[in-house]
Image (cartoon, rainbow, N blue to C red):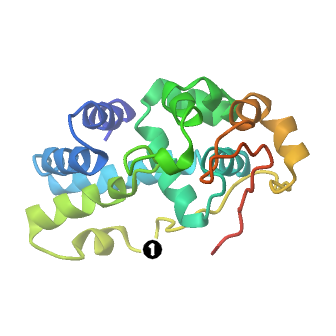
Amino acid sequence: MTDEAFWRLIERAAEQPGDLDERTEWLAEELTRLPVPQIVDFARKLSSVRLRADTWTLWAAAGLIQDGCSDDGFWYFQLWLLSLGRATFERVVAEPDALAEVDAVRALARKPMNAWSDQDWPEWESLDFAAHEAHQEVTGRDCGLDEALGAELPVAPDPAGEDWDAADPEEVARRLPRLTALFSGRQVSDGSSDSALSISLSAGS
């Protein structure tokens, strides 16, 4: 599967009505129209694209936006980045602080977190299962995609690059100045303003 074909599917899915789970259902249905090797290739492509967003700085960015981010949360955040489209994904991977200019992120900054709906959260967990559902539908095998892929794909974040102290607010502000400014006055659940955001980046937390 070419990069163009992969992104065409992702972007069309993101444009569908309904919530992210419903968009995943649409994507899984589209994948069932492909030959089985193409479904497997889509899963590989999804993993390789997601891997580009597996960096310490993007984990810190996710922590700023969500007031903390576990390893699972960061995995789903990486997948959510794909929903922004190829051009935005490429820009954010190259410059994580550019998230401060993304409309969906700016909308979150305007809301207190206790007012976020389930669909507001920057996570697309179900995207991880679209190829599995399609493969099972076409082949009738519950774990057929896992068998086809073997142990070749990662199943948890393993950030690349410099491992810096993302729990240090000053270092976060230096590396992500625009995003820090955007969320510095956020409203927390008790209705008060809190600029000292907690960023939990501990794997397994």
Q: Position of residue 166 (x, y in %)?
A: 80, 53
Q: Is residue 122 visible?
A: no
Q: Quadrant of the N terminus?
A: top left
- Mark 1 is surrounded, within 10 Å at the Cα level, by few (under 14), some (14 to 19) or many (20 or more) other residues, namely few
Q: Residue at x 26, y 51 (%)?
A: 21
23 to the left or right of 184: left
Q: Nearer the viewer, residue 37 or 77?
A: 77
Q: Residue at x 57, y 31 (%)?
A: 110
Q: Residue furthest front?
A: 191
Q: Nearer the viewer, residue 172 or 87?
A: 172
State the image quarter where residue 180 is shown.
top right
Q: Is residue 40 above or below residue 179?
A: below
Q: Position of residue 205 (x, y in %)?
A: 64, 73
In this figure, what is the number of numbered marks?
1
Q: Residue furthest right?
A: 170
124 to the left or right of 156: left
Label 1: which secondary element: loop
Q: Is residue 57 visible?
A: yes
204 to the left or right of 197: left
Q: Is residue 202 above or below residue 180?
A: below
Q: Is residue 9 above or below residue 103?
A: below
Q: Position of residue 121 (x, y in %)?
A: 46, 48
Q: Residue at x 73, y 46 (%)?
A: 57
55 to the left or right of 142: right
Q: Residue at x 60, y 65 (%)?
A: 71
- Label 1 sits on what residue type? Ala
Q: Is residue 60 above or below residue 183?
A: below
Q: Nearer the viewer, residue 25 or 153?
A: 25
Q: Which residue is mark 1?
A: 151
Q: Position of residue 178 (x, y in %)?
A: 74, 28
